[in-house]
Image (cartoon, rainbow, N blue to C red):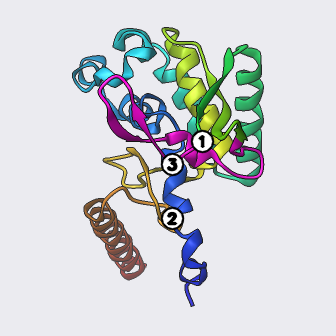
């Protein structure tokens, strides 16, 4: 029986929700666009207003090669040792960056009313609740005291803050890289069993390519065998 289906119903939503346990401007979306854009102009054309805290698109692009070097051996390691070394090197680098963080008081409810436009909004800090993050109550007022990063405008630090958040809440496990040789895009999947391809099309193209390679190798073997 599929292990995922054996999970109690109340636990199933926590797997995809890991991807949302970040402020909107600090989710993995902007990181994926950065890694998957072939050129700086392509990335700039997709640069969303919500990512303005990164700084300029040009500054963010300067960190792309460095981040690729750090994430490639972690997302698609050749050996377990390479993965361990990649994780250790990444954490050591982040420690040396002296990221700034501060603590904020957030509403202690699932939803809250934004006084700026009097609209009901989802409290993304609610997704952080767990063993080390609780709702507290003083004077009948429920609150969540939580930490966020504060290096707005420094693209490199903000991008590595996103990576660190993903390491802490487990979202990094949902990060994959497509195995199809003509794609190689980074993507996120809600199903941890999906490890190889970003789309069904890429999976089909890859399997067809592998089949052609095997067939060509078999024909070459038969020709060589017949010539002996």
The image position of residue 109, as x and y in percent, is 54, 45
Residue under the point 64% across and 32% down: 164
Q: Is residue 165 above or below residue 228?
A: above
Q: How many marks?
A: 3
- Secondary structure under tag 1 reads loop
Residue lying furthest front? 139
- The magenta span reads 109-136
- Can you tell which quarter of the image residue 3 is in? bottom right
The image position of residue 138, as x and y in percent, is 72, 36
Decide: few, some or many residues near mark 2? Use Cα within 10 Å; few <14, some 14-19, many ≥20: few
- Secondary structure under tag 2 reads loop
Q: Which residue is mark 2?
A: 13
**Mark before the other along the chain sequence, 3 or 2:** 2
Work out how far the residue at label 3 is from the one at label 1, CA to CA, in angstroms.
7 Å
Q: Which residue is mark 3?
A: 110
Residue under the point 44% across and 16% down: 54
The front one of 104 and 220 is 104
């Amino acid at each position: 029986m599929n292990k995922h289906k054996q999970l109690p119903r109340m636990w199933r939503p926590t797997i995809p929700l890991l991807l949302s346990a970040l402020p909107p401007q600090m989710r993995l979306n902007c990181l994926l666009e950065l890694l998957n854009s072939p050129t700086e102009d392509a990335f700039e054309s997709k640069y969303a207003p919500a990512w303005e805290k990164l700084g300029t698109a040009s500054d963010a692009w300067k960190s792309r090669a460095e981040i690729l070097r750090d994430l490639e051996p972690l997302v698609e390691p050749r050996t377990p040792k390479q993965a361990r070394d990649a994780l250790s090197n990444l954490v050591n680098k982040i420690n040396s960056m002296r990221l700034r963080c501060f603590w904020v008081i957030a509403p202690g409810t699932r939803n809250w009313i934004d006084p700026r436009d009097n609209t009901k909004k989802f409290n993304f800090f609610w997704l952080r609740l767990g063993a080390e993050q609780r709702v507290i109550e003083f004077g009948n007022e429920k609150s969540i005291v939580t930490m966020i990063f504060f290096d707005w405008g420094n693209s490199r630090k903000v991008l590595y803050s996103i990576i660190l958040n993903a390491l802490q809440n487990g979202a990094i496990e949902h990060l994959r890289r497509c195995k199809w040789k003509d794609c190689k895009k980074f993507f996120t999947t809600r199903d941890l069993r999906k490890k190889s391809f970003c789309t069904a099309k890429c999976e089909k193209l890859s399997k067809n390519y592998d089949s052609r390679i095997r067939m060509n190798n078999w024909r070459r073997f038969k020709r060589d065998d017949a010539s002996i």
